[in-house]
């Protein structure tokens, strides 16, 4: 299972929000490029980089900072999210060196754009963010809640060729309250065979090495960790070791 540190960029700085609330921001590093290098040096194989301003405004905003992160960590696969609402934005990020582009709001409102991106660039280069609040998918930088359920979105997009999903439990994001394993298990069961567990990355409340081990034991593709790394609740090295231990078969 991949351990994927999160770098959320707002106003050119590396920040964390609580439950996606733009009014509850903590700045952890004025230099997100330096943060990316630090995670790379600590062993990260993939980074999850989000343009928070872009997610809210519906267009890329922190392009320069995020492009600089991608360029600074050539040995690390970077997946870019936030404000990607059209095919041209997907093209730009892949051309800039991103390993994968993450689509969120547009996947709910214009799923054909996602299908076209998969067809053009291949399923390995495209992921869909499934950001859920009480089971319903949130859009527009988590500022609005749709009527679509997480499992319905995932099933529908799997039929359109999507093979990578990033599921975020918004209620636990940035809260350091651990993972709702029962709820996540219900989601995986509800989605069914159309979406393999090894297609899903989990995000939201990953706080301890025990959380990591249990997630790895569920057979998922990866776990994104943010606040717990920045707060020092868990080190990246320990998280990587826990992922290996949890993923071992007996």
Image (cartoon, grey):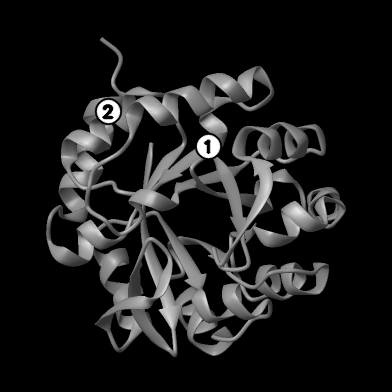
Residue at x 21%, y 48% (from the top left corner)? 207
Q: Quadrant of the C terminus?
A: top left
84 relative position to 230: left or right: right
Vertical side of 63 occupied by 172: above or below: above
Residue 117: x and y in percent read 80, 56
| Residue denoted by label 1 | 200
Answer with the quarter of the image where residue 16 lies.
bottom left
- Determine whether label 1 and label 2 are within 8 Å by CB: no
| Residue in front for this viewpoint, 237 or 176 | 176
Vertical side of 81 occupied by 244: above or below: above
Residue 196: x and y in percent read 59, 25
61 relative position to 182: left or right: right
Vertical side of 207 occupied by 220: above or below: above
Residue at x 59%, y 72% (from the top left corner)? 55
Mark 1 Cα shell of 10 Å, populated few (<14), some (14-19), many (≥20)? many
Residue at x 30%, y 38% (from the top left corner)? 179
Answer with the quarter of the image where residue 232 lies.
bottom left
Residue 27: x and y in percent read 27, 82
Secondary structure of residue under mark 2: helix
| Residue in front for this viewpoint, 133 or 86 | 133
Q: Of the numbered discs in the image, which one, if any, rests on residue 137? A: none
Residue 67: x and y in percent read 54, 81
Answer with the quarter of the image where residue 226 lies.
bottom left
Secondary structure of residue under mark 1: strand
Residue at x 39%, y 69% (from the top left corner)? 7
| Residue denoted by label 2 | 214
Q: Is residue 37 visible?
A: yes
Q: Can residue 72 be seen in this view?
A: no
Give the mark nearest the N terminus, 1 or 2.
1
Marks 1 and 2, how far apart at CA:
15 Å
Mark 2 Cα shell of 10 Å, populated few (<14), some (14-19), many (≥20)? some
């Amino acid at each position: 299972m991949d351990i994927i540190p999160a770098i959320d960029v707002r106003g050119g700085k590396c920040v964390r929000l609580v439950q996606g609330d733009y009014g509850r921001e903590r700045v952890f590093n004025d230099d997100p490029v330096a943060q990316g290098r630090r995670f790379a040096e600590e062993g990260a194989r993939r980074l999850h980089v989000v343009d928070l301003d872009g997610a809210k405004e519906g267009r890329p905003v922190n392009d320069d900072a995020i492009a600089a992160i991608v360029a600074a960590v050539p040995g690390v696969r970077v997946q870019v999210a936030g404000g990607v609402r059209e095919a041209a934005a997907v093209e730009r990020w892949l051309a800039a060196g991103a390993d994968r582009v993450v689509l969120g709001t547009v996947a709910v409102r214009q799923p054909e754009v996602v299908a076209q991106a998969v067809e053009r660039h291949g399923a390995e280069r495209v992921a869909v963010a499934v950001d859920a609040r009480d089971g319903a998918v949130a859009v527009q930088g988590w500022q609005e809640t749709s009527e679509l359920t997480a499992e319905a979105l995932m099933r529908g997009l799997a039929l359109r060729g999507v093979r990578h999903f990033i599921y975020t439990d918004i209620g636990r994001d940035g809260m350091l309250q651990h993972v709702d394993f029962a709820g996540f298990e219900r989601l995986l069961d509800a989605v069914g065979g159309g979406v393999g567990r090894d297609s899903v990355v989990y995000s939201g409340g990953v706080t301890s090495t025990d959380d990591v081990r249990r997630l790895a034991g569920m057979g998922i593709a990866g776990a994104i960790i943010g606040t717990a790394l920045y707060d020092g609740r868990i080190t990246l090295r320990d998280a990587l070791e826990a992922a290996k231990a949890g993923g071992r078969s007996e």
